[in-house]
Amino acid sequence: MFFRFLILFTTIPLLEIWLLLEISKHLGVLDTIALVIITGLAGAWLAKSQGFMLWQSIQLELQQGRMPSDSLIEGLLLLIGGIVLLTPGLITDTAGLLLLFPPSRKWVLKQVKKHFSSRIRIQPIHYDNPME
């Protein structure tokens, strides 16, 4: 897992820098910077509107052995999309925007539900009878 994160956190920033340099050749430096700022502001607004309480709600449902509702998971995907839009770069912005569009978000929702359902452990319920 560490190696995956190491690759992820070194490769993506390098690709982002390369892409930003290439785009600035075509659009110009100021337009490229404006593009990054606009997507960052959109991400900040989205992240603020969704809130981090959503994540806590999902964790609580999973701990109780219940599958979070679709709308709750979609809200989490919107939050993640907003946070990813905050990071400067166009690759991460594309990933964030994909989470904002309903068709691609629905596909991701199905994948997340598969992941969550594989993590939920069915445990027997123990109940003590106070009358005994």
Image: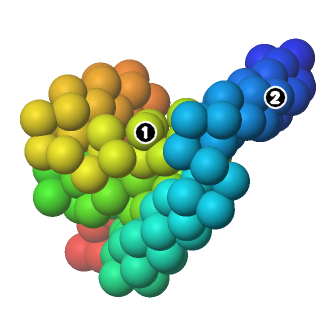
* Number of other residues with Cα within 10 Å of mark 2, as a class: few under 14, some 14 to 19, many 20 or more: few
Is residue 9 visible from the viewing direction of this image?
yes
Foreground residue, 9 or 62?
A: 9
Residue 120 x, y percent position in the rendering: 39, 35
Left/right of residue 85 with respect to residue 102 in the rendered view: right
124 displayed left or right of 52: left
Query: Which quadrant of the figure has residue 87?
Result: bottom right
Q: Residue at x 35, y 82 (%)?
A: 49
**Residue at x 41%, y 80% (from the top left corner):** 45
Q: Amino acid at mark 2?
A: Leu
Image coords of residue 15 (percent x, y)? 73, 26
Indicate the quadrant containing the C terminus: top left, top right, bottom left or bottom right: bottom left
Q: Secondary structure at mark 1?
A: helix
Task: Work out which quarter of the rendered image holds the N terminus and state it.
Answer: top right
* Residue bearing the label numbered 1: 94
Q: Nearer the viewer, residue 130 or 120?
A: 120
State which tag comes first along the sequence, 1 or 2. 2
Residue 123: image quadrant is top left
Q: CA distance from mark 1 to mark 2?
A: 16 Å
The answer to whether 49 is drawn above or below residue 96 in the figure is below
Q: Residue at (73%, 36%) from the top-left corner?
A: 21
Vertical comparison of 105 with 88: above or below = above
Q: Secondary structure at mark 2?
A: helix
Is residue 37 or residue 113 the one in the foreground?
A: 37
The x and y percentages for residue 88 are 66, 54
Where 67 sits versus 71, above or below? above
- Badge 1 local density, few (<14 within 10 Å), some, or many (20+)? some
Q: Which residue is mark 2?
A: 14
Q: Amino acid at mark 1?
A: Thr
